[in-house]
């Protein structure tokens, strides 16, 4: 005779399951909302990047006014204040990003320019040679404010010209020049033939990550529901016939 089962949930397991499912569904929906917000931000970024370039002069600009906008600056590169950002990998090869200030206008202010990637020479004690064009140049690119969220591999965050990461504050403390509060990510188009590679990834807003988190929360809600149903299905007691 087939066994009979019945669903007999207890009060506290029911309340706990309901709370867990409600919480995980709310978190999943929140992650979907964040993904939607960032999708709108990305659309706005694409719109701004396609607009007219903002002129960068020796007059100080506000970072919020140029962040993720296209900019154009005229000036002269100053190699003595350059820094090499360490552990930047391109096609499996470890190298550096070369960040060099561009002296603007009357020379009272500079704009930092990420000129691109250069391969290391295999000797940590020796930096690669970088060709720097002389004279007045026009530099175009995307204005970025370096993030402060990064992992430092050691306490020695700056070793001479080699830095683990770049922030505007760190550069201002280390160098005796006034700079604009952003970095120009130099375009490949129109740049001089200096041997540097300029293959820039688009700004990562983490949209796919939010969708991934949303899926995990919804999957957890389904798991809680399945566990609740399975653990509260009991074999029905049968009475022996007389």
Image: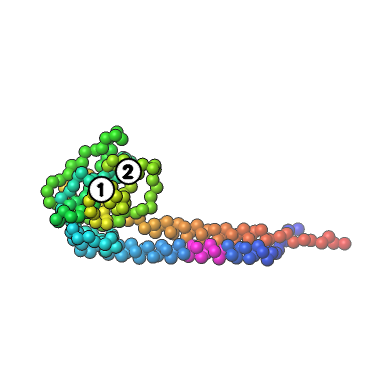
Residue in the image at 45% along x and 62% along y: 31
Is residue 134 or residue 196 the one in the foreground?
134
**In-image side of 192 versus 93 (left or right):** left
- Residue 201: x %, y % from top left: 30, 52
Q: Can residue 201 be seen?
A: no
- Residue 216: x %, y % from top left: 50, 57
Q: Secondary structure at mark 2?
A: strand
Q: Are marks 2 and 1 in contact (CB under 8 Å)?
A: no
Q: How many marks?
A: 2
Q: Secondary structure at mark 1?
A: loop
**Does residue 76 show up magenta in the picture?**
no
Instruction: Name the disc covering residue 25, or none.
Output: none
Residue count near mark 2 (Cα–Cα under 10 Å), binned few <14, some 14–19, many ≥20: some
Rendered image coloring scheme: rainbow
Region in magenta: 21-29
Which quadrant of the figure has residue 51? bottom left
Residue in the image at 53% along x and 62% along y: 24
Look at mark 1 in the image and give the residue it sits on: 175
Q: CA distance from mark 2 to mark 1?
A: 12 Å
- Residue 3: x %, y % from top left: 73, 58
Residue in the image at 31% along x and 40% along y: 159
Is residue 15 or residue 77 the one in the foreground?
77
- Residue 59: x %, y % from top left: 19, 60
Nearest to N terminus: mark 2 or mark 1 = 2
Residue in the image at 24% along x and 61% along y: 61
> Farthest left residue?
135
Look at mark 2 in the image and give the residue it sits on: 158
Q: Main secondary structure of the magenta part?
A: helix
Which quadrant of the figure has residue 117? top left
> Farthest right residue?
242
Q: Quadrant of the N terminus?
A: bottom right
Q: Quadrant of the C terminus?
A: bottom right
């Amino acid at each position: 005779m087939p066994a009979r089962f019945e669903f007999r949930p207890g009060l506290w397991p029911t309340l706990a399951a309901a709370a867990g499912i409600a919480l995980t569904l709310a978190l999943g929906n929140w992650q979907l909302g964040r993904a939607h917000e960032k999708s709108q931000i990305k659309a706005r970024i694409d719109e701004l990047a396609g607009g007219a370039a903002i002129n960068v002069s020796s007059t100080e600009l506000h970072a919020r006014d140029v962040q993720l906008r296209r900019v154009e600056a005229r000036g002269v590169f100053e190699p003595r204040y350059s820094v090499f950002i360490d552990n930047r990998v391109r096609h499996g090869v470890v190298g550096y990003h070369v960040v060099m200030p561009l002296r603007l206008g009357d020379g009272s202010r500079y704009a930092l320019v990420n000129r691109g990637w250069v391969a290391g020479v295999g000797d940590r004690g020796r930096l690669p040679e970088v060709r720097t064009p002389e004279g007045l140049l026009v530099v175009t690119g995307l204005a970025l404010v370096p993030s402060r969220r990064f992992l430092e591999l050691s306490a020695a965050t700056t070793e001479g010209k080699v830095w683990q990461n770049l922030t505007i504050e760190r550069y201002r403390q280390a160098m005796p020049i006034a700079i604009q509060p952003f970095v120009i990510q130099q375009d490949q188009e129109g740049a001089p033939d200096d041997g540097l590679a300029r293959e820039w990834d688009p700004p990562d807003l983490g949209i796919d990550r939010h969708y991934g988190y949303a899926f995990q929360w919804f999957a957890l809600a389904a798991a809680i529901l399945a566990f609740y149903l399975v653990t509260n299905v009991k074999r029905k007691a049968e009475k022996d016939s007389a």
